[in-house]
Image (cartoon, rainbow, N blue to C red):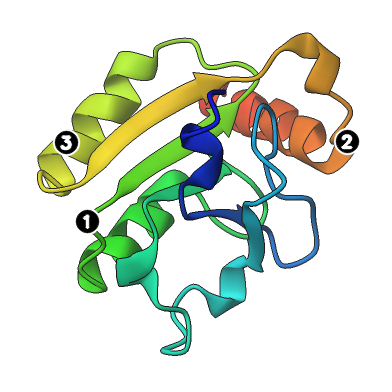
Amino acid sequence: MTFHEGLRTMITLAPDEGTAPSAGLSSLAANVPYRLLRHPSLKIEDVETVFCWLFCSSYDVLDIAETLSKRTFSGTLIAQTWDLPNPKIVKAELRRSYPMLSFDIEFMPETHSGNEKYERFMRQRATVTMA
């Protein structure tokens, strides 16, 4: 991360009872609980980058994209995850549903694993999807 990037206005979205994604992020990023994303006091138009989990128990990236689109967010949405078999599918769905939204997926290094709730949720989701 360069000095300039560290000055961006960023928020990380935490599940209502969980940890926000933070791999590689500046300490200047504000940690905002998901339930406050729709609150009018959050000036989303001033935010350049929103970081969120790709999937978690409180939301998935499609929920975040929908909310940001309704609030006329013009920055970049970045979803973080440890594993995703085919990221092209998620990116295509987001581009189709929210063409004005700038979006990317970041894969977190294994050294940042340890979010047990997230890992358990992903294992359960994979089991349901494969069934």
Point out which mark residue 116 bears: 2
Residue type at mark 3: give it: Arg
Q: Where does label 1 land, which residue?
A: 74
Q: Marks 1 and 2, Cα distance to the nearest angstrom?
A: 32 Å
Image point 23% across, 34% down: which residue? 93
Between marks 1 and 2 in the image, the one whose residue lies nearer the viewer = 1
Look at the image and tell me in which quarter the N terminus lies.
top right
Task: Residue 11: name its quadrant.
Answer: bottom right
Give the residue drawn at x 88%, y 35%. 116
**Disc on the earlier residue, 1 or 3:** 1
Name which residue lies at 44% across and 37% down. Answer: 78
Q: Position of residue 118 (x, y in %)?
A: 75, 38
- Along the line of sight, the residue nearer the viewer: 131 or 37: 37
Specify the quadrant of the image occupied by residue 86: top left
Which circle's residue, 1 or 2, is located before the other in the chain?
Answer: 1
- Percent position of residue 108, x then y: 65, 19
Residue 16's place in the image compared with 27, above or below, is: below
Q: Residues within 10 Å of mark 3 (few under 14, many from 20)?
A: some
User: Are there few (<14), some (14-19), or many (20+) residues within 10 Å of tag 1?
Assistant: some
Left or right of 117 in this view: 81: left
Kindly state the secondary structure of the residue where label 3 is placed.
helix
Mark 1 vs mark 3, CA separation in Å: 14 Å
Which of the 4 image quarters holds residue 119? top right
Name the one closer to the observer, 67 or 72: 72
116 relative to 97, above or below = above
Query: Where residue 98 sits in the image (x, y, percent)?
Result: 16, 48
Disc ID at residue 95: 3
